[in-house]
Image: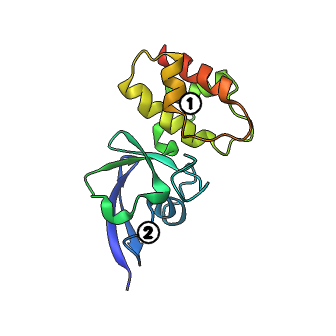
């Protein structure tokens, strides 16, 4: 029998019917709530495509069980970071620097970058590279991604 799980996602209280409390947050976001910002990449927390924020911290939603979250914790996906009318500075910088190629990994890169910049106001290029070291991009746009994060840091 399905249980109901209450979450705060993108500023809204939501209830999700779940059969397995160990179900990853990623599946609830995509399948139950229709939020496709977090992507399934590896399912092992190794690529970063599924990155979301939980209470401002970047987490891999593919390995975050729903049972580990409370209704008081704030989950933010790419859809909740900014809007088309009011982009988050990181989103704007990624567009301005043309940091996107295929786009699959970029949502996770943006979420990781936004969490990083929230705690590191004036990063060095080396700090940006270190912060994004565990986010994989097979298209090779790393140089433009680093430039975008540096630009967002000055916004």
Q: Residues within 10 Å of mark 1 (few under 14, many from 20)?
A: many
Q: Quadrant of residue 22?
A: bottom left
Which mark sits nearer the N-terminus, 2 or 1? 2
Identify the residue at horizontal 67%, vertical 23% (top origin): 143
Instruction: Give the image location of residue 92, x and y in percent.
Output: 58, 25
Outermost residue toward the left in this view: 72
Residue 42 visible? The answer is: yes
Residue 89 percent location from the top left of the image: 51, 24
Please state if 66 lies on the left or on the right of 71 as rendered. Answer: right
Residue that carries the numbered disc 1 in the rendered image: 91
Disc 2 + disc 1, Cβ < 8 Å: no
In what element is the residue under mark 1?
helix
Q: Is residue 35 left or right of residue 94?
A: left
Residue 113 vertical placement versus 13 (above, below):
above
The answer to whether 47 appears left or right of 70 in the picture is right
Query: Could you say whether the residue bearing mark 2 is in a helix, strand or loop?
Result: loop
Q: From this view, report whether residue 28 is shown above or below residue 11.
A: below
């Amino acid at each position: 029998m399905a249980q109901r799980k209450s979450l705060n996602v993108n500023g809204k209280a939501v209830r999700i019917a779940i059969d397995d409390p160990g179900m990853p947050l990623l599946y609830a976001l995509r399948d139950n709530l229709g939020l496709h910002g977090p992507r399934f990449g590896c399912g092992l927390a190794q690529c970063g495509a599924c990155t979301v924020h939980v209470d401002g911290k970047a987490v891999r939603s593919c390995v975050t069980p729903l049972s580990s979250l409370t209704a008081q914790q704030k989950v933010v996906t790419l859809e909740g970071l900014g809007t088309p009318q009011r982009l988050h500075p990181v989103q704007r910088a990624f567009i301005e620097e043309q940091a996107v190629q295929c786009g699959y990994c970029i949502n996770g890169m943006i979420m990781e970058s936004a969490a990083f910049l929230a705690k590191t106001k004036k990063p060095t290029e080396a700090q940006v590279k270190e912060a994004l070291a565990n986010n994989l991009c097979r298209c090779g746009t790393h140089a433009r991604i680093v430039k975008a994060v540096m630009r967002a840091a000055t916004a």
